[in-house]
Every structure is written in structure tokens, then in C-alpha cells.
Image (spheres, grey):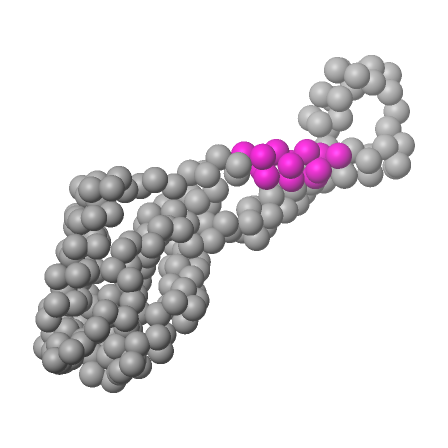
Amino acid sequence: MGYLDERGRALVAEAVAEAEANTSGEIVTILTDQSDHYNDVAFMWSAGASFAVMSLFALLPRPFLDLWDGLVAGWGHQWTTGELASMVIALGLIAFFAMLGAQQYQPLKLALVPGALKTARAHAAAIRLFKAGTEQRTVDHTGVLIYLSLADHRAEIVADTAIAEKVAPEVWGEAMGDMLAEIRQGCIAEGLAAAVRDVGFVLAQHFPKPEGDKNQLPDDLIEL
């Protein structure tokens, strides 16, 4: 993927280390291109295009038949029921695969994904990664995941149980806002670092760092 260079990765890791210096909380950062491949959405659009073209043929068959007669069959051609059925199927298949092929261009494919679905898939991906790599992997259940999906333009902050009991989800709004403000200017590493600092500030208020506290999760940015 290569969104960040070494300097950018180091900037995020340093922000995590500095934030965790004042709290027993553990911050994990994940950067990915997309939360999902959205192949199911691509197939739905392709099926829709197929049915649309077949419906158009059923409604206005003459232009299609005249074009085929002019190019291939000849003007004296008499269409049989079987040939008409074959034409419908052929048009449907052409539309299906043309739409599917067009969506190999990722910006178009993503543009056709509803925003609400992107949000749902990003949330599901963040929860899945949190459960796999962060949840209950700290002694006091004080892990926080900052998840950023760039192509989807979606971000999530997910906290472990001990934090969720003390910190309402809307508290993370400032961290999200500061992160997105930087990212909109093309500063991805700076955006993640800003979110880390804000999350660390909140954690320090509720979970100050005790004596002998050890780092339980890696500080390095995870890129998927």
C-alpha cells in the first residue's frame, strides 16, 4: 500500500509512546486502504445494469433489432421467438460483464458504494480487528484501537470494556475531528498522531499510569 514513509510511521509510533507515558491505557493504530472489497455491491450493480438493458429491449425492441439487422443479419431477416430470446439473454450478459469490467476501476467501484454501507463495513472491520488484536489483551482491559480506512474515507475508535464503562463514545469526537482535519490536507501521519494525542489525553484522566506499568501492545503503526 505504502501510504506512509519511514518518517510518517515513526511519527505515529512516537505519538503512541508519548501518549502511553501518562496512562495505563494501550493505543493501537491501524491504517488500511479499504475496509472491504465490495464485490457483492459490484455484482448487484452489474445485475441491475443487466436487467435494465433487458427491460429496455422489452420496451423498445425495434432499435436493437434494426441495429443488428443492419450490421449482421440483413434487412430481410425475420426474427423467430428463439432468436428474440437469445437477443435478450445476450444483451443482459453484455451489460452485466460491461458493468462488472467498468468497476475494475477502483474509484468508480467505490463511488457506487452507498455511504451508509461504507460506514457499516468500516465499523465491522474495526470491531473485527479490535477483537483479534486489542480486546482483552491488556491486564486491565484498557486497549483502544484507532482505525483509518483511506479509500473509504472512514475512521473508527474502538475501546475495551474498562474504558467504555468510563468514557462515552462521543468523547472521542474531538480525536476524530482533529485526525480528519489533518487528513483532508493530505497529512495522514499527522492526522493519526493528532488522534493518538487526543485519545491519550482522555485515557490519562481516567487511567493514569501506575508505578511499574509495562507496555503491553506494540506502538508501531499497523498497515494492512
User: 67 and 192: which one is in front?
Assistant: 192
Where does residue 192 sit, x and y in percent of width and height?
21, 54
Quarter holding residue 206: bottom left
**In the rendered image, is residue 120 in sight?**
no
The question of residue 93 being in magenta is answered with yes
Apparent side of residue 142 relative to residue 178 in the rendered image (left or right): right
User: 110 and 78: which one is in front?
Assistant: 110
The main secondary structure of the magenta stretch is helix
User: 86 and 66: which one is in front?
Assistant: 86
Tell me the magenta residue range. Answer: 90-102
Apparent side of residue 205 relative to residue 222 in the rendered image (left or right): left
* Residue at (29% x, 54% y) in the render: 221
Apparent side of residue 148 relative to residue 79 in the rendered image (left or right): left
* 169 w.r.t. 191: above or below: below
* Residue at (88% x, 37% y) in the render: 81
User: 22 and 46: which one is in front?
Assistant: 22
* Residue at (55% x, 46% y) in the render: 42
The question of residue 2 being in magenta is answered with no
Where does residue 209 sit, x and y in percent of width and height?
13, 77
Where does residue 34 sit, x and y in percent of width and height?
41, 50
**In the rendered image, is residue 41 in sight?**
yes
Apparent side of residue 135 relative to residue 143 in the rendered image (left or right): right
Quarter holding residue 101: top right
Quarter holding residue 140: bottom left
Where does residue 214 sit, x and y in percent of width and height?
21, 73
* Residue at (89% x, 32% y) in the render: 80
Quadrant of the drawing holding the N terminus = top left
Count of labels in the image = 0
